[in-house]
Amino acid sequence: MDKLRFKIRSKILLGYFLIICCLGVSIVIVSERISSLQSEIETIASRDIEVHNLISSIRYNVINMETSQRGYVITGNEIYLEPYIRGKAEWEANYNALYQYLSDDPTTIKNLEEIKLTIQRWISTAGEPTIEMRKINNTQAIIDYFNEDLGKKDVDSLRIQLESLRQSEITATKNHILKLENRNDMLIISLYLMLIIVSIFALIIVSLVSGAIIKTIKQVVKTINDIASAGGDLTTRIKVNTRDEIKDLAEATNALLDNLNDQDWIKTKVAEVATMNQGINDTTTLAESFLTKLAPILDAAYGLFYIRQGAGEQQRLIKLASYAAYGDETGHDSFRLGEGLIGQAAVEKRTFLLNSAPEHPISLTSGLGKVQPRSILIVPFEYEGKVVAVVEFASVDSFTSQHLKLLEQIDNHLGVAINSVVGRMEIERLLSESQVMTEELQTQTEELQTQSEELQMQQEEMRMTTEHLEEQNLFAEQKTKELEKAKEELEAYSEKLKKSSQYKSNFLANMSHELRTPLNSILILSQMLAENENQTLNSDEEGFAKVINTSGNDLLTLIDDILDLSKVEAGKIILTMDEVNISEIPDHMQLLFQPVAEQKELAFHINVAADVPPLLYTDGQRLQQILKNLLSNAFKFTEKGSVTLDIQKADLNDTKKYIPAHIDKDVLAISVTDTGIGIPHDKQQLIFEAFQQVDGETNRQYGGTGLGLSICNEFTKLLNGRIVLDSSPRKGSTFTLFVPSLPDMEKEQLVSFDFDQEVAAAAEPLDIVSAPDITEHTVTDLTEDECTLFKGKKVLLVEDDSRNVFALVKALENKAFNVTVASNGRQCLDIIREKSDFDLVLMDIMMPIMDGFETMQALRQETDMKDTPIIALTAKAMKSDRDKCLEAGASDYISKPLNMDQLFSLMRVWLTKQVGN
């Protein structure tokens, strides 16, 4: 029968199939007409294009011949004849091809013949004769010919004939296109008519298919409404005669009604069982009532009710009641948990259903005899997740799923009922025991009354003791509150210290940038004035400029010292551990301080012991900074005599005394000895504090900030070393630096001081890269070759500060550079897009609109600027700036304030490389 079903999908698909067939026929007809029309259009287009091309080619050939003929006649050069010969060969081929396209029109054929005759006449009367005259150098004949120039009339006539032919072809093409447009309009009208016909046919098919479907659906809806209007009679069923999905819907609805009917039955029976439990105060009565009520509902002929009693290992399931039991076959009296199916059901909280059990020992007894049960059902009942009872039923018929669903619904109700009854029984028991205890308490109360009088005296004594303790407790609470208040104040003060440290670090970093920017222009301009290359200043003015330059460098040193101190006070600093070549230290110190010694007329000695290890694993930058500070102080506070630098391996006893933790490592003892003013004993500890000096009065003789030794001391701690001072007033001082080799330390690490941990954690360290000291570089004058190298070189200066722009432009123009200025990154890119022939770019980093990092990245993306040297200029002295600049595309890096000799040196290096490439 299923094969004969005509489903809704099949009906819809049939309708769609018929509609698609109609559309397919229409599409085939329209496609055929469109293809035909398209073919004609393509034919016309290709033919017309070829005709116009051939007409243009013939005109071109004739013009080439005429031009070539005149060129040859004028010059006599055989090269000019090549276009004439080529045109003479090609025009006939083009003419024949054109003749093939236009041979179907007699009028056009006549015009073509006239064109051919005109060309041939020009060749025979003008072209060939004049060429022949030129070959024999008959100049007079050529002049006579061109005075009359009969060939020009033929060429002019040919132009008119070709243009007339082209216009007639254009007119013919327009007429043909007009005919095609008319045919296209007819095709569109036909297409609309076919769409209308197909739409009407589709509506008819849709109406027939939908009508057949809707009719059946209305039958189902009518039946459902009848069921609803009959007062909820769930026994009514839907009948449908069709063999499609509507019939499936009706059958599913009928199954739903069956399910609702079963649920209604379950709810009714659950309500009957729930009302049955009301008013029962005894578990046995509850069990008997439950079995009596539920057994007929389940069609059970036998039943047992077990309740859970006891605690711990003594818990058992005790039989309370039975249904239809006979004689000794009333079942076991009790089970332990896990014993038998009854005990196992309680442990697993699972229902057991046993079907087909003819050998069951239980027999169902009636007046006529005994019957063996066919199905046994064991159900546990829970309360708050704990099994409180297990019930067993037996039946001659199989238990149904509807019975099991009913028991699932009853589970919670019965568990609550059992718990309520047990609770009420426990209350009655306790009430009974309470009455007995009340009588006993009355007797004991009389005895206690006597004892109470005795205790009153003791209580009075206790009261006085308690009052004293309360006073002490109140005093302790007051002290506790004071301590808590003090703690809160300390926490608030600690928080302020954190913020203060952070603010100071940020302030110093920003002030570094703000101070270095104007200082840059001061140093550049003062250096230019001091050099006095143009000899425009007198000796006094040149001296003034040198003082300004020296003061600017002193200010730069002060900024670097303050930034170093900021790192120290922040409590964290980055160490870069690496191998330091000890042999380089004397040479470097000699180079730095020998000029100072000569200026002050002091002897400068450097002694290196033979047993000094060649390499020391430490932070070379910090070590050199310590030594430079110690030597600078020695020269500053020594007016006559000498300064000595001794480098030797530390004595084992000194190592044990000063840095015992590194007794197993190589330790250097580097001493700086001077014959200066010396340090009193009471100030030898003070000088290692920030902003403190031996000569610390307002009228002091020696300058300085008092930061050097403080920074040295803290840097020495970072290197796990120690500075030891031995000094006497007016006899000089010896600062000995003990520094160990630390090969086990990581190459780069963050080190914290033993300052207040909370403040140290809140203060982010400034990774400061000190500006290069002018004394660290050998200044050389530019040679004539270098001047030649700089002369006329184009430099793009990208700088937003007008003071620095003025100073740098003046300095660069003095060296014959051609300078272009951009005030920000955006303007720089605009300039580069207009012209990119710059030899070098000087790029400031901190700029508005678009900073130097972004600008350099953008420049490197420009093809013409990929290899152009870019030197980054920055006033923000952060350690990571160099790496960031190089990553962004910089070729090199120099920090502000700029040392112009260093800058020119860098520029010379990169311009030389560029020239070499």
Image: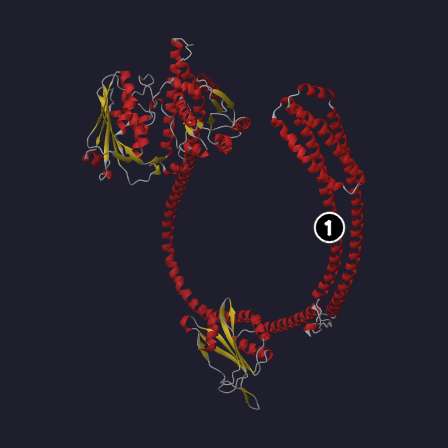
- Residue 678 in view: yes
Q: Position of residue 606 (x, y in %)?
A: 23, 24
Nearest the eye: 789 or 531: 789
Residue furthest out toward the front: 136
Q: Up-down: is 113 above or below 540? A: below
Q: Is residue 875 left or right of residue 741?
A: right
Reply above or below: 535 against 558: above
* Amino acid on which disc 1 is placed: Ser
Which of the image's four quarters has the N terminus? bottom right
User: Percent position (x, y) of residue 747?
Assistant: 33, 38
According to the image, what is the colour scheme of the structure?
secondary structure
Nearest the camera: 16 or 33?
A: 33
Label count reads 1
Determine if residue 278 is in view: no
In the rendered image of this protein, does residue 179 appear above or below residue 571?
below
Residue 73, percent across and down? Answer: 65, 23
- Is 531 rendered above or below residue 622? above
Q: Which residue does the image show at 56% across and 76% down from the upper left?
A: 290
List x then y, in percent, for residue 55: 72, 35
As helix, strand or loop, the secondary structure at mark 1 comes to helix
Residue 647 located left or right of residue 303: left
Based on the displayed image, in which of its 4 quarters is residue 155 positioned? top right
Mark 1, other Cα within 10 Å: few <14 / some 14–19 / many ≥20:
few
Task: Looking at this view, name the residue that lies furthest to the bottom.
Answer: 368
In terms of depth relative to the viewer, which is nearer, 354 or 188?
188
Q: On the rendered structure, is 913 left or right of 401?
A: left
The answer to which image quadrant residue 485 occupies is top left
Which residue, given by chain and number where applicable, does mark 1 sit on? 35
Query: In the image shown, does 152 or 284 lie closer to the viewer?
Result: 152
Dividing the image into 4 quarters, which one contains the C terminus?
A: top left
Q: Residue at (71%, 63%) from the top-left corner?
A: 13
